[in-house]
Image (spheres, rainbow, N blue to C red):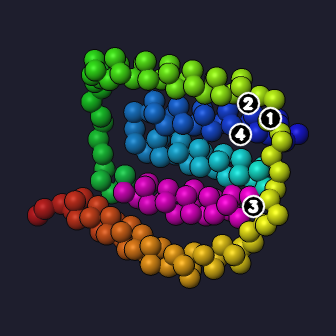
Amino acid sequence: MHLALFIIFGLLCLGGALNLLLQRHPINSALSLIVVMSSLAVLYLLLGAEFLALAQIIVYSGAIMVLFVFVIMLLNAGLEEKTHGSRAAYLAGIPGMLALLGVLGGTFFTLRSSFGSARLGAYLATTHDLAQVLFRNLLLPFEVTSILILVAILGAVVLARKEH
C-alpha cells in the first residue's frame, strides 16, 4: 500500500513540477506549485515524518503560496513573451541533464539491493525537541527570516503601486 501511494504521489509531484514549468500564466504556475508542495507533504507522511508533513502543509502550501499568489495578483503580470531560449543553454543543459540521469541511474542500479534496509536510530526527535532547537537555538535566524519576508511584501506593494 505504501509503495502504491508513494508512486501515485511521486508521479503527482513530478506532474505538478512539469506543469509548473510549462504554464504560461504565473497564477497557474503558483497553483501547480501548491500541488507539488501538497504531494511532498504526503510523501513526508509516508516516511513517518508527521510533524514535517504538517509543517509543509501549513507553512509552504498555506502561508508561502498565499504570499506568492498575493504578489502575483498585486503585480498584475501580463502575458509573457515566448522566446526560443539561448543556444548555449541547450548546448550545456542537454548534456548536463544526460550526465545527471546517468549518475542517478548508476546509483540506483548499484544500490538497488540495499533499498528498504533503512532503520530508525536510537534517538527519535520529538516535537518538543524540534521546538527547543527552533525557538531557543535558532530564534534569531527564525525572526530575521520573518522580517525579510515582511520586507519582500512591502517591496512588492511599493513596486506595484500606481503613480497618480
Q: Which residues are magenta?
A: 49-71
Disc 4/disc 1 C-alpha distance (Å): 23 Å
Q: Which mark is residue 9?
A: 4
Q: Say which of 143 and 122 sits in front.
A: 122
Residue 126 versus residue 32: which sits nearer the camera? Answer: 126
- State the residue at coordinates (59%, 44%): 36
Q: How dense is the environment of label 2, judged by Cα within 10 Å: few (below 14), some, or many (20 and up)?
A: few
| Earlier residue among tags 3 and 4 | 4
60 relative to 98, above or below: below
Q: CA distance from mark 2 to mark 1?
A: 5 Å
**Dot 4 crowding, Cα within 10 Å, few <14, some 14–19, many 20+:** many
Disc 2 + disc 1, Cβ < 8 Å: yes
- CA separation in Å, label 3 and label 4: 16 Å
Left or right of 15, for residue 66: left
Quadrant including the N terminus: top right
Q: Are marks 3 and 2 in contact (CB under 8 Å)?
A: no
Residue 34 location, x and y as percent? 56, 49
For the point 75% across and 34% down, the residue is 7
Residue position for label 2 = 111
| Magenta-colored stretch includes residue 153 | no
Tell me the distance, in whole angstroms, between the alpha carbons under discs 3 and 2: 27 Å
Return the residue at label 1. Answer: 114
* Amino acid type, mark 2: Leu
Where does residue 29 sit, x and y in percent of width and height? Answer: 46, 41
- Label total for image: 4
